[in-house]
Amino acid sequence: MSAAFEKIAILGLGLIGSSLCHGIKEKKLALKIVGHAKSAETRRVAHEIGLVSEVFEDPADAVKGADLVILCAPVGVCGALAAAIGPHLKQGAILTDVGSVKGAIVRDCGPHVPPGVHFIPGHPIAGTEQSGPRSGFAALFHNRWCILTPVAGSDGAAVQKLTQFWEALGSNVDVMNSDHHDLVLAITSHLPHLIAYNTVATAADLETVTNSEVIKYSASGFRDFTRIAASDPTMWRDVFLNNKEAVLEMLGRFTEELAVLQRAVRWGDGETLFNLFTRAREVRRGIIAAGQDTAAPDFGRKQS
Amino acid sequence: MSAAFEKIAILGLGLIGSSLCHGIKEKKLALKIVGHAKSAETRRVAHEIGLVSEVFEDPADAVKGADLVILCAPVGVCGALAAAIGPHLKQGAILTDVGSVKGAIVRDCGPHVPPGVHFIPGHPIAGTEQSGPRSGFAALFHNRWCILTPVAGSDGAAVQKLTQFWEALGSNVDVMNSDHHDLVLAITSHLPHLIAYNTVATAADLETVTNSEVIKYSASGFRDFTRIAASDPTMWRDVFLNNKEAVLEMLGRFTEELAVLQRAVRWGDGETLFNLFTRAREVRRGIIAAGQDTAAPDFGRKQS
């Protein structure tokens, strides 16, 4: 696939935005990539490491003449970004995003998209616990899923072109509606992050066990939780503020199940514990069979 | 350190037991290693892959003449094992174990230890999600902590000898009392495992999101939880049955904190979310600085 787009504008140059820059260059998917970042330091770094040809402070300058515009900012600022760029978008351009919530993106960005621009929200299910313009790498999207949530009246050819773009980056593409996306991500991503943050906070606040003990003996399970609890706080705040209903629904279910488990511990009901633990093992096997995690023990992590 | 022991008996040949066999051989810490396994299949595999010189069905046969005996069975069966071997232990031998709970080991095994045998409970903070006699490897204990919880009247020289044994396997050794151990492990290990099991079960029971969707999109956070939820169900049932008070205490704190977080989501309190998420990041940094996890993104895991 050679130069599918003439000019791609990446608005926001964090982990996902900078990974897109690397991937687009590696696969030669655009003749030119330009960027926008709110922070002067991010713009400086983007320039220094050559992420993009040009980096703009004003997002409106970045999108002029672009035939693909990708919002890579926290979900909470995408509406304002769309309002700022709306009048400057090229006719026939595709506007997409990478946010972990899709209903709020449709709600906040949709009204600012002018007729003749193809608005197709998207979400690559990929990431690491790192953030910032230096954290990106082209392989981030390899063998991962990208979900597109076209809105009513989305142009089929534009959806097809965006699908090919993600496939060229190494991803598999699924299409679903934004409500279902937000429910699926509430359980596979948002709940696990909230639980991980909460576990780390619980441990940090104990009086009977010191923080240095928690850190020292973390290899017994705790450290697995800390990886996703190290993700970008702004991005995650915005996720929870913008997918409230689905997250509260999953939290309610989680708490009910936990009450059952807690009762089993209190009453010494070994059979309930054993059966639930055995069932959980099967899910892990499914994830490995689906190629979404490594079967190597301990994630194959190397110790320092 | 050459042949610190003449004969070591490993009772239970799962992940920890088989890793000990490999480590003892690699470091030449014994002239002879013998084993015991309850299951005929495990005994057959141990023989086939040459884990030990001899493998016995009756644990009493394994411990005869051994100067170091290590119980590597689930916590719930250690008491019966101690009762079976007690009369056959050699005078001056060291008896230890590797269980994730220490109070219950002292309670269940202590009464069966004859005078003249040095009983020093222990717990290597090391493991993977794999189990069985083929899952062991010598490097499992490298750069990990091993906690010893000597009982009242433990012989200083014996504690010193057991400390050197673990250090020879690559571990750092800490000494604390069994009650404090059980509290520390409740937060660093037992709570995270219970929460991981519960998250996986919650996801598996949804009607609105299919299991295949959970598996497909697991790279967004969920898959990190599934690794420790794939650990041995028997071992973990016994942990929860035998460290009930400390686990219930940590669960109570976790649930309180979660209620605060849930309220912040419901009321759209972004500041509370942001502050808690920022704090959690620091704990991750501490774990990496302490050499207890890798700084490579995504645990450095390789994708299949």
Image (cartoon, coloured by chain):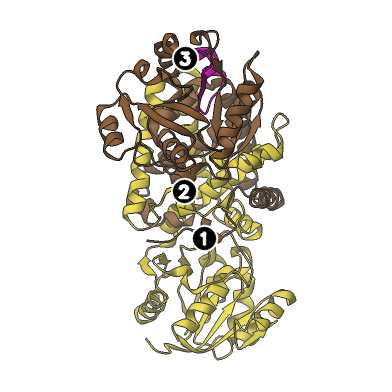
Chain colours: A yellow, B brown
**Measured from the top left, where is residue A166 in percent x and y?**
41, 74
**Measured from the top left, where is residue B236 in percent x and y?**
44, 30
Numbered disc 3: secondary structure:
loop
Disc on res. A101: 1
Asked where in the image residue A41 lies, by quadrant, the reply is bottom right
- Compared to A5, does A20 lie above or below? above
Numbered disc 1: secondary structure:
loop
Asked where in the image residue B245 lies, by quadrant, the reply is top right
Disc on res. B34: none
Q: Which residue does the image show at 49% across and 74% down from the upper left? A: A138
Disc on res. B90: 3
Q: Which residue does the image show at 57% across and 79% down from the upper left? A: A10
Name the amino acid type tagged 1.
Val
Which residue corresponds to mark 2?
Answer: A298
Q: Does any portion of residue A156 appear in the rendered image?
A: yes
* Image-based side of A293 in relation to A259, left or right: left
Q: Nearer the viewer, mark 1 or mark 3?
A: 3
- Compared to B236, does A220 lie above or below? below
* Range covered by the magenta-colored residues: B91-109
Label 1 chain ID:
A
> How many numbered marks, from 0 up?
3
Q: Residues within 10 Å of mark 3 (few under 14, many from 20)?
A: some
Name the amino acid type tagged 2.
Asp
Q: CA distance from mark 3 to mark 2?
A: 38 Å
Q: Residues within 10 Å of mark 1 (few under 14, many from 20)?
A: many
* Marks 1/3 same chain: no
Q: CA distance from mark 1 to mark 3?
A: 65 Å
Label 3 chain ID:
B
Name the amino acid type tagged 3.
Lys
Q: Going from the N terminus, do you reach mark 1 or mark 2 first?
A: 1
